[in-house]
Image: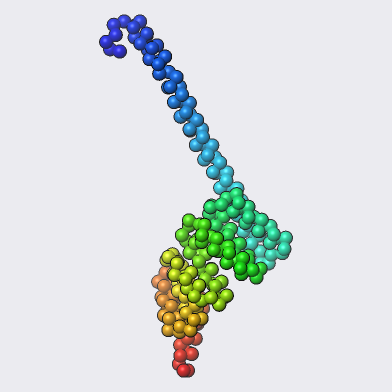
């Protein structure tokens, strides 16, 4: 541009440049605007989905927190669980709903359904703590079903430090069910030490340990 001698030549150069590049420039602006609009629309959709999932989960909590669930309330709770998994699968609310599904199944005497729900969460969730919590609850059900070996396998897969005391307490129960009294004693002791170190109360473990000691003393 600096080498051009007159304003007319500069104007002609600008016109030629616009003719050659104007269309692509406009297209770029339109694409950029569309991208921004699309991103804003996606953010809005995500926010609406999260709000809808939150509302459903709060409704589920209200139903599940009742001391006893009548058939109609239980049906509503299961409908909310299904909706959360169908419409918001993979979300935190869907994972929490699956934990509630397992608890409701236990309350209804459906241990198979509870195990299936917990196994589903372990397989599908990408949230490490919730997976470990599901493993802990699954181990309890496996112990209730007299499958101590399966319970130990579930407990071995738990990594969460926040669940260490409960995991060792349940490991003691599993070892005791297998007749491994010394292993059970060690697990109970570790559970108590972990609970004390973390400041988390662990009820009943000391009594189980005391009962083991008393039984040994009479042999």
Could you say where residue 93 lies in the image, as x and y percent from the top left?
56, 54
Could you say where residue 135 lies in the image, as x and y percent from the top left?
50, 66
Q: Decide which of 61, 180 is in the foreground and name it.
A: 180
Does residue 184 sit above or below 8 in this rendering?
below
| Residue drawn at (47%, 71%) of the image | 153
| Residue drawn at (57%, 46%) of the image | 49
| Residue drawn at (55%, 77%) of the image | 146
Could you say where residue 217 lies in the image, as x and y percent from the top left?
45, 92
Q: Decide which of 195, 6 is in the foreground and name it.
A: 6
Image quadrant containing the N terminus: top left
Instruction: Single out the residue that lies furthest toward the bottom.
Output: 219
Does residue 208 sit above or below 67 in this rendering?
below
Q: Decide which of 23, 2 is in the foreground and name it.
A: 23
Number of numbered discs on residues: 0
| Residue drawn at (50%, 72%) of the image | 150
Residue 187 occupies which quadrant of the picture?
bottom left
Instruction: Single out the residue that lies furthest toward the left.
Output: 3
Q: Is residue 41 left or right of residue 184?
A: right
């Amino acid at each position: 541009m600096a080498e051009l001698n007159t304003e007319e030549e500069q104007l002609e150069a600008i016109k030629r440049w616009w003719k050659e590049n104007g269309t692509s420039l406009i297209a770029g602006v339109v694409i950029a605007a569309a991208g921004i609009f699309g991103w804003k629309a996606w953010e809005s959709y995500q926010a609406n989905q999260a709000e809808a999932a939150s509302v459903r989960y709060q409704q589920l909590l209200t139903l599940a927190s009742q001391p006893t669930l009548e058939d109609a309330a239980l049906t509503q709770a299961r409908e909310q669980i299904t909706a959360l998994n169908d419409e918001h699968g993979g979300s935190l609310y869907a994972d929490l709903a699956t934990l509630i599904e397992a608890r409701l199944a236990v309350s209804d005497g459906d241990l198979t359904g509870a195990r299936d729900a917990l196994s589903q969460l372990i397989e599908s969730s990408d949230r490490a703590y919730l997976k470990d919590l599901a493993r802990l609850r699954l181990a309890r059900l496996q112990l209730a079903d007299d499958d101590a070996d399966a319970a130990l396998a579930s407990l071995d897969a738990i990594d969460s430090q926040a669940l260490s005391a409960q995991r060792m307490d349940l490991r003691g129960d599993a070892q005791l069910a297998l007749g491994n009294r010394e292993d059970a004693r060690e697990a109970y002791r570790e559970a108590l030490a972990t609970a004390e170190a973390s400041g988390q109360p662990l009820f009943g473990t000391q009594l189980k340990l005391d009962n083991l000691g008393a039984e040994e003393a009479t042999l």
